[in-house]
Amino acid sequence: VRGNKIHLDLHTVRNTEDTRYPGTYSGYDDTWNFTKFKNNFKMDVVPLGAREVEIDMIGIDTPFANAFRRILLAEVPTMAIEEVFIYNNTTVMQDEVLAHRLGLLPINVDPRLFEMKKKGDKVTERNTLQFRLKIRCKRNKKAPSDTTNPDELYLNSKVYTRTIEWEPIGDQKNWIPGGVRFTEEDILVNVLRPGQELDMRLHAVKGIGSDHAKFSPVATASYRLMPEIQLLQPFRGHMAEKLKSCFSPGVIEIENGEAVVKCARLDTGSREALRHPEIADKVKLLKVRDHFIFTIESTGALDPLDLMREAVKILKHKCKVYRKELDVLTT
């Protein structure tokens, strides 16, 4: 049976095919087994910051990892501005462009507290968040006479997310912990000049990324295979330095005058080492087929680990629906 390592050559990639299917090899049973999967599967969490995390998923196949990626991008719900009621807009930005821009602002509120608003439903405190944006630009009479800086010449010349105020509907102020705000207070929405003003009311609803990208809860959700670097012979002196320079910082270090693989997971897979004849046949670059490094960067509405938990729940629900349909077909 072929190993679980993918081989990186200078111009090709070998052993990419996954042959772990029943009947692939005569006399060898590779039927999927839950007990075997449960014993081999492992998850390690590597926090990278308040909104970013790396999750090592060991012992799964690519379809599973890709399913989580697609669910995170398109099926985990968040709240986003859907309706913009414009009472006055005398700025240079057109109404539709401004409305689109407002819809992309990430809102820091737990979407699990809300219900989906269906077509025809009335606005309630359980399906809608309401905001108000009202601002007018004026000249600053106290500005220095020799300044040309717009921030000094004008008042309210820039519209930031902190300018948009949340207007609680019903009893929202009591059951939404911490209130509602945008994930960042200094996102620039529009630029005004004296005499220009904005007056509008905004409604945010619950939705999913497959309906519109503004509902996607992640800035990025991606995965890569765990790199593995094998040094087939010792590298010392200037050869050790040259080998180190072929990889990303932190991958190869020199200890006691000899090159060692310090942290293979930092390797980007550039294969720079294989471009040098004096190194190429002394290094083996591999990828572990069933070890995925999954990176999740949240937009701020939910913690990245909470997003992963929600993705697992959605995949679990899909499996239940699929099994129910199979049961119907077999009866």
Image: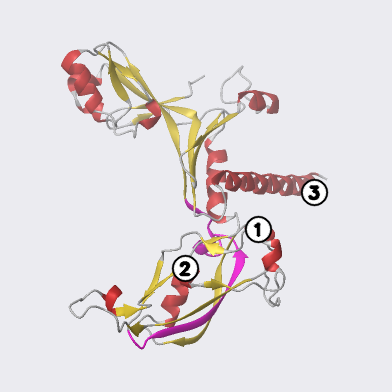
Type of amino acid under label 1:
Pro
Q: Residue at x 32, y 32 (%)?
A: 12
Residue 266 seen from this side: yes
Question: Does residue 195 lie above or below 240 as drawn?
Answer: below
State which mark lies toward you, 3 or 2: 2
Q: Earlier in the sequence, mark 3 or mark 2?
A: 2
Q: Splitting the image into 4 quarters, where does residue 58 fall?
A: top right
* Residue designated by label 3: 328
* Residue designated by label 1: 177
Name, please, the residue furthest toward the right. Answer: 331
- Residues in magenta, as a range: 194-219
Q: In front: 229, or 189?
A: 189
Q: Residue at x 23, y 22 (%)?
A: 243
Question: Which disc number belongs to residue 105?
Answer: none
Circle 2 — which element? helix
Q: Residue at x 50, y 72 (%)?
A: 164
Q: Position of residue 185 (x, y in %)?
A: 45, 63
Q: Splitting the image into 4 quarters, where does residue 116 fall?
A: bottom right
Question: Does residue 76 lie above or below 207 as drawn?
Answer: above
Q: Is residue 55 magenta?
A: no
State which mark lies toward you, 3 or 1: 1
Cα separation, mark 2 vs mark 1, equals 19 Å
Q: Earlier in the sequence, mark 2 or mark 1?
A: 2
Question: Which disc number belongs to residue 162?
Answer: 2
Q: In front: 16, or 136?
A: 136
